[in-house]
Image (cartoon, grey):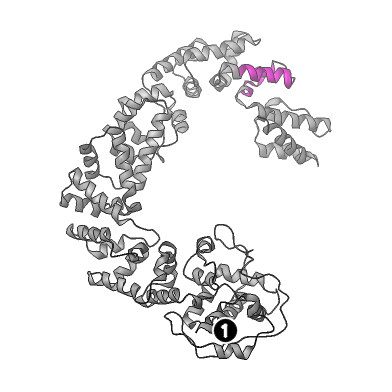
Amino acid sequence: MTHLHKLRTASVLKWVSSNFDENHLRSARTPIQLIGYFPNGQTPRFYKTERSPVTESCENVDRTSTGNGKISGRISRAVKKEAQAALLDYLYCTRSLHFVDAENMSKNTPHFLKKLIKSADNGKKIGQTIARFLRYHPINEFEPFLESLGLKPPEYVPLLPHKLMFLIDDDLLLHNYGVLCHYGIARNKIGKIYKEATEVFQYQVGVLLSKLQAYEELGLSQSALIKFVVASPYLLIGDANASFLKLLGKLKSLGFEISWIQRNLSEENSYNWSRMLEVLSFLSKMGCSDRQLGELIGQHPDILFEASGERTFSIIGFLLKFGSRMSQVYSLFLQFPRIQVMKFGLNLRKCFFFLNEIGMKVPGIGKIIRSHPLLLGSCALKKTNTLLLHLNIGKKSLCRYIQENPQELKHWVLGRRLRPLDWGNNLRSKTEKAKFLLDIGFVENSNKMKEALNEFQGNGWELQERFDCIVEAGFDHEEVCQMVKVSPRILSQSKDVIEMKIDFLVNHLCYPLSTLLIFPKYLTYGTKRVQHRVLMYNWLKDHGTDPTYALSTVVSCSDVYFLRKFVNHHPSGPQVWEDLKSKIYSKQ
C-alpha cells in the first residue's frame, strides 16, 4: 500500500514519462474498498503513444467561464456527448472510479467539460482527441467532482486541495461522500454541505453515520433529516445542535409538526437555529401567549424563517429606535398585515427616507412611525420627486399636510393615480394664481383659465415676477398677455431661466426678439434641444438642402419627423446630426 500511495501521488511529469514501466504500474495497482470508490474489475489502461500537440492543460486554462460562474460560448449536443463519453471512459476505466460517480462527474460538470473541450485539439473527432489528451494530461479530479456536487467554479476553486489531484488520495472524502449518498442526499445537494461544513468530509470511518443515527434516535425521520442537513450543514459538526433541538421542541409545543417546518425551509438558504429560537423567546417576552404566538407564526412563517428571523429583529430594532414601546411593537405583530416581513421592513424604511427627503424633522418622523407603523409598513410609496410633482405642493407644505393627514400616505403608493392637493398654502396659492390670470385678461371659470391654472407651477407673486421679466425684455404688457394666453406654461419657469432663454435666442441663435410673439412656446423648450435643431438646420441650409422654415417648425416637431423631414435629405446629414448631438449634450 505504501508503494501504491507513492505511485498515485507522484508528479504529473513522472506519471506520463516515457520511461515508466507500464507492467510495473499494472502490477502495483490493487483494489481499495472505499465507500463512494469501487473498482470495476477492469484493468486500468495506461497509454504510451505519440504526445498530443495540445500544449495547455485543462486544469490551468479556463477560457469558457465568466467570473460569476456562467458559461460563455456554446457547444453542440453531439460534441457534448462525445466529450462526456470520453471523460466517463477516463474516470471509470482508467481511474477506476465507481461507475455512478464517474457518470455523475461526466454529465453534471458543464464548466469543466467546456474547459476540457477548449483545452484539447479542435479536431473533428472530439471524443478521440479528449481521450488522447487525457492519456498525457491527468486532470485535477477534484474540479469535476466538486462541480458535480452542485458547486460553481467560484465556489469550489477556493476549496480545492493544494497537494492532491486524484480523488483516491483522499479516502476520507470519498468515504463520507458515500455515506451521504447512501443516506439519500442528492449528489447536487452535497456541494452545499461541502462548502459550509467541509470538515464533515474528514470524519473518520463511522463518525458521520453515527451522527445521522443520533438525530434519528431523537425522533427525526430520514426524509426530514435530509432536508434539515441540506438547509443547515453545520448540524453535522460537533454534537447534536442544542438550539436546533430546542427550536423543534418549542415549535412542537406550539402545535407545529416536523412536516410543517420542512415545508417552510428552503434548501437554497442556510438557517441560524439559535437566532430563530431567540425570535420566539423575544416575542414571548413581549407578551405573546403560546396561543397567540402559534397563530402569528402559522399565519406569517417568514417572521421566523426569513433570514432566520433577522428581518423580524430588524423591524423591531427600527421601531424601538424611534421610541416605540414594547407594548406598541407587540400590538403591531398581533395585527401584522398579510405582507412579507421583508417587504414590510423595506416599506417602513422607504417611508422614513421619504419623510426625511421632504425635510421633516426627526421628532415629527418619530411621532408618525410610533403612531402608524402598520400604515407605513403596508405602503409602497412612489418616489419623492414623483410625489412632489404630481401633488403640486412644496416640501414644507407637504410635511405639514402629512402630519395632519398621515392616512393620506396610503393613496400615494405605486399603481395609484395622484391628484394635486388643495390644502393650506396650496389653496391660497391657487387663489392668487386665479387673480393673476384675471388681471391679464383670462375669463373667469373659462376652460382656458382652468387649463392655465393646471399648467402653472409657483405662487401668484412668482408668476407676476416672471411676467414682468418678459415685459422688461422689450415687449409691452398686452403682447406678453397674449403670449401667456397662447402658451401659459412659459410662466412655469423661474425668472432666471426665462431671461437665459431669451438671451440665448437673441444673442446666440441670432433670432429677432419678435420671434417670441409668433412662437412663445420656445420658452418651454430646453436650450440644448433648440441649439441642436437650429445648428443642424443651419448646416442643411448652408449645404442647399432645405428652404426656409419657421423656428416653431424646426424646434417643436419630434426627432423622428425632424430626421425624416430635414436631416436625411443630405447624405452626410445623419452623421452631422450625431456629431452635433454628442458635442452639445456632452457639455455640463
Task: From the top left corner, tell me how far across and down residue 534 is, in percent.
Answer: 73, 28
Residue 114 found in image quarter: bottom right
The region drawn magenta spans: 498-522
Q: Residue at x 31, y 45 (%)?
A: 313
**Residue 515 falls within the magenta-colored stretch:** yes
Quarter of the image that includes the C terminus: top right
Assess disc 1: are there few (<14), some (14-19) or many (≥20) residues with their C-alpha within 10 Å of its C-alpha.
Answer: some
Q: Residue at x 80, y 39 (%)?
A: 570
Amino acid on which the number 1 mark rests in the picture: Thr
> From the viewer's perspective, is 558 left or right of 156?
right
**Front-lying residue, 256 or 153:** 153
The answer to whether one can see residue 402 in this image is no
Magenta segment main secondary structure: helix
The answer to whether one can see residue 265 in this image is yes
Look at the picture and state if 148 lies above or below 457. Answer: below
Look at the picture and state if 1 lies above or below 287. Answer: below
Q: Farthest front residue? A: 2
Task: From the top left corner, tell me how far across and down residue 480 is, in percent.
Answer: 60, 13
Task: From the top left corner, tell me how far across and down residue 505 is, in percent.
Answer: 69, 20
**Front-lying residue, 132 or 429:** 132
> From the viewer's perspective, is 39 left or right of 223?
right
Task: From the top left corner, tell me how far across and down residue 253 is, in percent.
Answer: 17, 59
**Residue 259 falls within the magenta-colored stretch:** no
Q: Residue at x 47, y 31 (%)?
A: 385
Residue bearing mark 1: 94
**Front-lying residue, 11 or 397:** 11
Q: Secondary structure at mark 1?
A: helix
**Front-lying residue, 547 or 197:** 197
Q: Residue at x 71, y 17 (%)?
A: 506
Look at the picture and state if 518 lies above or below 289. Answer: above
Residue 491 found in image quarter: top right
